[in-house]
Amino acid sequence: MEKLTLRDIDTGGKRVLVRVDFNVPLNEKTGTISDDSRIRAALPTIQYLVDRGAKVILCSHLGRPDGKVVESLRLAVVARRLSQLLGKQVETTSDCVGTEAEKSSGNLKNGDILLLENLRFHAAEEENSPDFARALAALADIYVNDAFGTAHRRHASIVGVTEYLPSVAGLLMEKELEHLGGIMESPAHPFGGLIGGAKVSDKVEMLENIMGKVDFLLIGGGMAATFLKAKSFEIGLSLIEEDSLDTATSLMEEAAKRGVRLLLPVDVVVAAEISSESESQVVAIENIPSEKRIVDIGQRTIKNFSEVLRTARTVFWNGPMGVNEIPRFAEGTKAMARLLASLDAVTVIGGGSTAEVVTGMGLADKMTFVSTGGGASLEFLSGRKLPGVEALLDKGSVATVKN
């Protein structure tokens, strides 16, 4: 870690503003939380601060309210779940800035926890407004960023607030940077990437950046169609990025030049429509019907991928192998999750839908690390600087905390 963490400063009796990522999925019908793993991921930092007598002020966004108050996106439901997990009452406010927030934060006693209302009820949050950042900073003495999943955003609660408060990393942020940084800097070999998802364009920079570090790349999911098309295979009605065909070709050529083994599917599941009612069949990649589309990898591909993965000592996985929202087309994704869970290797799971799959299958604790950041983990592994990380104090800095 090149950045200061909350372990490096005295937080006792201080008001500590903690940016967490409580952007949890909600059940549309009941409004309840369908997956609380992001809340659980923040517990070590919150408990650490409570145990040391800090006055904890949590802030997060939830959903995309676009700068307006949306009743269904209030954070009260999150506060209730957090209270249950901590066994301690978590108070809330009806706004994240203003008179009520100032009064509530000022009345906190050592060890108390306050959750501010949804940051994105204010357009100023995503605009990185200095005034909004100052209003947030006025609530606290210290700022802790524990929201790796939003660290690639240049928002007021992520970057702007660091202009006004001594700013350090939380325990989850530290863990994310150490695990993701570890596989980039000193992975145990053989090191492989299992890459899926819909778009090649989303992952080009990451693939280019890890090319010199991995021993093999396994490509599945929707993006495999673009690679197959680049190799002149018929892909039927599968959606591809025409402007990424040359990129796919270049990536395959670069892999060959570097001695990186790049595997594509040898068979796939195809269907006329992406629906649970649509009939499907498994075909070799040479026999994909023109009127059907790829929806998953086939059994021979699962076998090939599994054989290669079993040789690995480090694996990074990002992106499903098929249309995993539909159970019938999720077999390839689930097979990869089960296989990785069984490996005696370092297994790091990129966030987003891949993390949701692993968590939903109850396999998260079988992996070395499951990242909470989808886009953030991709940008980090692409070699980009994350604004939310760059804004934190470096090791060796002196964190001057106001009294």
Image (cartoon, grey):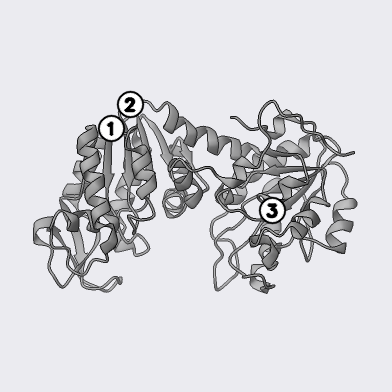
Q: Which residue is mark 3?
A: 157
Is residue 128 something one can see in this rendering?
Answer: yes
The quadrant of the picture occupied by the C terminus is: top right
Say above or below: 390 vs 239. above
SS state under label 2: loop
User: Closer to the camera, 123 or 50?
Assistant: 123
Q: Which residue is mark 2?
A: 189
Label 1 to label 3: alpha-carbon separation: 39 Å
- Is the Cβ of the residue at disc 2 closer than 8 Å to that at disc 1? yes
CA separation in Å, label 2 and label 1: 7 Å
Percent position (x, y) of residue 126? 63, 61
Are the residues at dot 1 and dot 3 in contact (C-beta closer than 8 Å)? no
Q: Quadrant of the N terminus?
A: top right
- Alpha-carbon neighbours of circle 2 within 10 Å: few (<14), some, or many (≥20)? some
> Residue shown at 15%/73% (left/top)?
291
Identify the amino acid type marked 2: His
Q: Position of residue 315 (x, y in %)?
A: 36, 36
Figure check: 74 above or below 331: below
Per the model, the C-alpha gap separating discs 2 and 3 is: 39 Å
* Residue with the mark numbered 1: 215
User: Which is closer to the viewer, label 2 or label 3?
Assistant: 3
Tell me the SS state at disc 3: loop
